[in-house]
Each structure stands twice: as structure tokens, then as C-alpha cells.
Image (tube, rainbow, N blue to C red):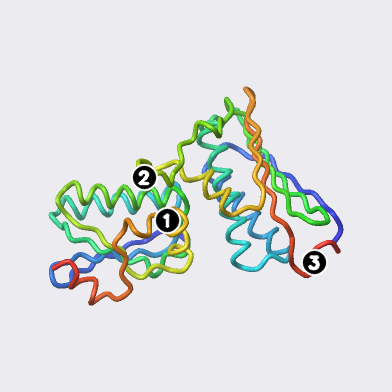
């Protein structure tokens, strides 16, 4: 497979969350990931989109979510950007800590980290960029 | 697929059959409303049958935690039945598998309430 990139600019809505998940599922499958890995990638993208729409842009209709998929020789790289105030990953409590186990939120970033090979969160006052990397191990890797 | 629920009564236990996706938005709200409705009607032994739940996200996990806590706070009990591999794995990863009382046999689960 040749290296390629596709990007979407989306509204800050719940529909965007579903669309991002569906796009991730389709692209992961097209890039040779098996059903389980595809589900994990799609869930990571869904959680990142939730963060962007809810916590980043806070459903602001004037703010957009940018979603980009890039297939490099070795990786599927997915970038999600919002236009919010900037997410501080250090401020997110550990959802596995006993005192947080029964909290009803705060597991999104944890799940993203669990499902992807590399996760880089770059907050800024004008938005947050979350970069997700999954190494391609299948028969299409590097082709 | 939209989240759907169906309520059954078996030997004093209320079984809430769930199907579809428990995700941010409609799915989570439907689960929340269903559990609240059961509690309002005095049903405090609730078995959440997740056999046909195809997908759950962090919001859905949070909603299940909320349901568990809400039922317990009202003196009731909530157990989970028939987890799919996806949901099972998610509860393992988030360390919630040991928090919830998880069953894989309906008759045994119903007996466990009594």
C-alpha cells in the first residue's frame, strides 16, 4: 500500500463522534488490521473525538474538530484536533486508583492509551492535538 | 444500532435485557432512564443482561457504574449477566470486573439474589 493521508473537518456534535468511529473502523480494516484491533482503534478514535467535542470544543457550533488519518510505511497515525482551551493530561486522575474506580467518568484517555501503541497529547491555549499511533503488523505492512 | 431494553420478572428479580450500543448520548440515557424507572417502581433486584450489547464506550461504562451505585444506594442490588468478550475485556482493563457481580447463567444469577 502506498502512503496516504485523508482528513476531515467536522462539527462539534455527537454525530461527529459516531462518524469518527466509523471512519476509523473502515480505514483500520482497509489497512489490514484484524477485527479486534480494528475495534480497539475505532474505540480509541471515538474516545478522542468525545474529548474533542465535549471537553475541548464543548459543543460550540463555531468550533471544529479536525480528524486526520495517515498511513506511513510502518504505522497508522491518527490525529484529532479541537479548538478548546487545552486538555492537561497530567490533571486527569488515574481511573484505576481505588478512590477513582467508581467514578462515572474519566476513563477516555486511559482507554485510548490502552488500545494504541503510542499516544501523544499536545495541549495549547487554542486547542488540543491528540496523536494516536498503531503499528501495522499485518501482511500489508511496509508495502 | 440503537440501544433497546426489555424488562422481565423472574422469581422476584427484574431482568433488564439490553441490546445494541451503550454509548455517549442516547444509549447511556436509555440505560439510565430504564434503571431509574425500575427503582421508582420498587424493583431493587436488578439483573442487567448484556448478551446482546454489541458495543460500549467509556460513557457506557460510566453509566453502568452509576446504575450500580444508584441501585445500591437505594438498598438494592445490581448484577451483570452474559457479558460479550468486548464488554468483558473492557471491564477487565478498567478493573471493574471485580467490582460488579458478573454472572453467565441466568438461573444461577436469579438464585444469587435470594
What chain is tagged by disc 2?
Answer: A
Q: Mark on residue B22?
A: 1
From mark 3 to mark 2, how far is it between C-alphas? 42 Å
Packing grade of label 2 (10 A; few <14, some 14-19, many >=20) is few
Q: Is residue B98 left or right of residue A37?
A: left
Which residue does the image show at 45% across and 47% down from the upper left? B24
Which residue does the image show at 45% across and 57% down from the upper left? B56
Q: Earlier in the sequence, mark 3 or mark 2?
A: 2
**Pointers 3 and 1 in contact (C-beta within 8 Å):** no
Q: Is residue A100 left or right of residue A58?
A: left
Q: Nearer the viewer, residue B102 or B28?
A: B102
Q: Mark 3 points at which residue?
A: A140
Packing grade of label 1 (10 A; few <14, some 14-19, many >=20) is many
Q: Mark 2 points at which residue?
A: A98
Residues at marks 3 and 2 on the same chain = yes
From mark 2 to mark 1, how far is it between C-alphas? 24 Å
Q: For the N terminus of chain A, which image quadrant?
A: bottom right
Q: Where is residue A91 in the image (x, y as percent from the top left)?
A: 50, 31
What is the secondary structure assignment of the residue under circle 1?
A: strand
Amino acid at each position: 500500500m502506498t502512503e496516504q493521508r485523508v482528513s476531515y473537518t467536522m462539527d462539534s456534535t455527537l454525530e461527529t463522534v459516531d462518524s469518527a468511529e466509523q471512519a476509523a473502523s473502515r480505514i483500520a480494516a482497509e489497512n489490514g488490521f484484524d477485527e479486534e484491533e480494528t475495534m480497539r482503534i475505532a474505540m480509541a478514535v471515538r474516545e478522542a473525538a468525545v474529548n474533542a467535542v465535549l471537553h475541548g470544543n464543548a459543543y460550540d457550533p463555531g468550533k471544529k474538530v479536525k480528524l486526520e488519518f495517515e498511513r506511513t510505511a510502518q504505522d497508522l497515525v491518527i490525529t484529532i484536533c479541537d479548538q478548546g482551551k487545552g486538555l492537561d493530561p497530567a490533571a486527569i486522575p488515574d481511573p484505576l486508583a481505588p478512590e477513582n474506580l467508581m467514578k462515572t467518568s474519566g476513563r477516555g484517555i486511559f482507554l485510548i492509551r490502552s488500545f494504541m501503541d503510542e499516544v501523544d497529547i499536545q495541549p495549547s491555549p487554542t486547542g488540543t492535538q491528540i496523536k494516536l499511533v498503531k503499528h501495522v503488523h499485518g501482511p500489508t505492512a511496509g508495502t | 444500532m440503537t440501544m433497546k431494553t426489555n424488562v422481565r420478572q423472574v422469581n422476584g428479580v427484574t431482568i433488564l435485557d439490553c441490546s445494541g450500543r451503550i454509548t455517549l448520548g442516547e444509549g447511556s440515557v436509555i440505560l439510565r432512564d430504564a434503571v431509574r424507572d425500575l427503582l421508582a417502581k420498587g424493583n431493587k433486584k436488578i439483573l442487567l443482561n448484556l448478551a446482546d450489547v454489541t458495543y460500549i464506550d467509556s460513557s457506557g461504562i460510566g453509566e453502568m457504574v452509576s446504575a450500580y451505585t444508584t441501585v445500591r444506594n437505594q438498598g438494592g442490588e445490581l448484577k451483570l449477566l452474559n457479558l460479550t468478550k468486548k464488554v468483558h475485556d473492557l471491564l477487565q482493563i478498567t478493573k471493574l470486573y471485580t467490582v460488579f457481580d458478573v454472572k453467565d447463567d441466568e438461573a444461577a444469577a436469579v438464585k444469587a439474589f435470594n
